[in-house]
Amino acid sequence: MFFVRTAMETDIPAVCALLSETWHATYDEILGPEKVETIVNSWLSHEAVLRRLRRPHGEFLVADSGTMIGGMAFAAPDKNNAEIVNLSQLYVLPGCQRQGIGQQLFAEIETCFPNAKRLALEVLPQNASAIRFYEAHGMREVGRHDECGAPGSGIPAIRMEKDLPGV
């Protein structure tokens, strides 16, 4: 049984291990193991995770069983539009998937930003299981581009959005 809580600095090593395992399991076949390892070492490094944890107005959550971290999510208001919250990360360890952890994390993120009107995210077009998950939770495709994760990344992305309750 997992419960969702706010992440702490002591969670960072477990979160980094989760991100590395999940990224390799999900993206090695899509992007290649070398590119995934480069991303893990930069975008998902201890320092990058710590920056997210300390980001003002961001929400960094973990799914904790008491003995392990099985999932994580990070969202923050859009830098250019306070009415939009960007869900930058939602990952569940491969061995913990399909147990409701992703659903718990997603539901909690939806409640963390009471003034936001929309939730947005990017997903790789080849990540069919993530697209199905997000569609099942009310997200819809609103566009595509080639800068997933960072400007100039060259990684294709589908942008999905959802109106938040109260809108």
Image (tube, rainbow, N blue to C red):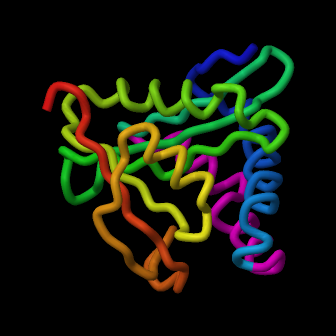
Locate residue 81 relative to residue 77 in the image: left or right: left
Residue nearer the viewer, 163 or 72:
163
Q: Residue at x 25, y 34 (%)?
A: 164
Residue 47 location in percent, x, y?
66, 55
Q: Which residues are magenta?
A: 32-56
The quadrant the N terminus occupies is top right
Specify whether residue 49 is painted magenta. yes
- Image: 86 above or below 11: below
The secondary structure that most of the magenta stretch takes on is: helix
Residue 5 location in percent, x, y?
59, 20
Q: Residue at x 77, y 17 (%)?
A: 65
Residue nearer the viewer, 142 or 48:
142
Residue nearer the viewer, 118 or 37:
118
Q: Residue at x 29, y 53 (%)?
A: 78
Residue 24 location in percent, x, y?
80, 62
Residue nearer the viewer, 82 or 107:
107
Which residue is the extreme one toward the left? 167
- Image: 20 above or below 42: above
Locate residue 80 relative to residue 154 in the image: left or right: left
- Image: 33 above or below 23: below
The image quadrant that residue 99 belongs to is top right
